Image: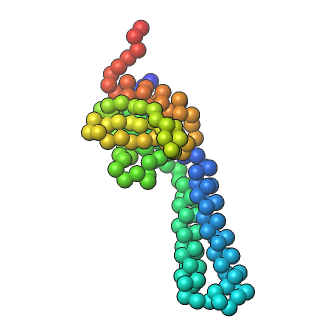
Amino acid sequence: MSDASVVSYRLRPAVGLRMVGVGFVWLAAFVLLEVLRATTDWLDGGIFGVLRIVFAIVFVVIAGAGAVMILDPRPGLRLDADGFTNRTNVLRRNSPRQGAWKEVDDVVRSDGAGGPTLLIQLNDGRRSPIFAKMLAARLDDIEQEIRTHLNDAHGYRPLQ
């Protein structure tokens, strides 16, 4: 593999589509509340007005985030000669989203609640989980590519 090789893995469109679907569930709740409000007099109170606004805002936020995930051209995981950029762990605050190959101690497979995961363990003890369910690629292919980049960065070559 040459030092200039860059490998990118896109996020699965299904992840964004699920978010849009959840947003539409909130929209359905909003419409149901509006229908009930229009057909009955007792739903005109203050709490139901607040609920209508909350349901509409939640719909816009969740469906908008899902649409951004679907339309965003940036890769979910990018591997290059210098290091990695991981966007599958956006909800984890303490998890590094990028790092240099020289900082990586190990790559470990893990099966957790989020499904099969690759953990990139850094020298300082932090871990960057790569959630395979969010990427449009097989876990074995991702792991092999990470190990190849890691070996190249450390100067390891296969025995001839």
- Is residue 37 left or right of 99 when viewed as pictured? right
Say which of 107 and 39 sits in front: 39
- For this orientation, the residue located farthest to the left is 124
- Quadrant where the N terminus sits is top left
Residue 141's place in the image compared with 14, above or below, is above
Q: Find residue 146 and report its horizontal and vertical position in percent.
A: 44, 31
| Residue drawn at (71%, 81%) of the image | 35
Q: Find residue 136 and report its horizontal and vertical position in percent.
A: 58, 41
Q: Find residue 18 and report its horizontal and vertical position in percent.
A: 61, 55
- Is residue 126 left or right of 23 when viewed as pictured? left
Q: Find residue 113 and report its horizontal and vertical position in percent.
A: 51, 44
Say which of 112 and 152 sits in front: 112
- Quadrant where the C terminus sits is top left
- Is residue 160 left or right of 59 when viewed as pictured? left
| Residue drawn at (35%, 19%) of the image | 156
| Residue drawn at (50%, 33%) of the image | 142
- Using the rendered image of the protein, determine whether residue 135 is visible from the camera's viewpoint: no
Asked where in the image residue 16 lies, by quadrant, the reply is bottom right
- For this orientation, the residue located farthest to the top is 160
| Residue drawn at (44%, 48%) of the image | 89
- Using the rendered image of the protein, determine whether residue 23 is visible from the camera's viewpoint: yes
- For this orientation, the residue located farthest to the right is 39
Asked where in the image residue 104 lies, by quadrant, the reply is top left
**Number of numbered discs visible in the structure rendering:** 0
- For this orientation, the residue located farthest to the bottom is 41
Say which of 41 and 21 sits in front: 41
Say which of 40 and 99 sits in front: 40
Residue 146's place in the image compared with 23, above or below, is above
The structure's colour scheme is rainbow
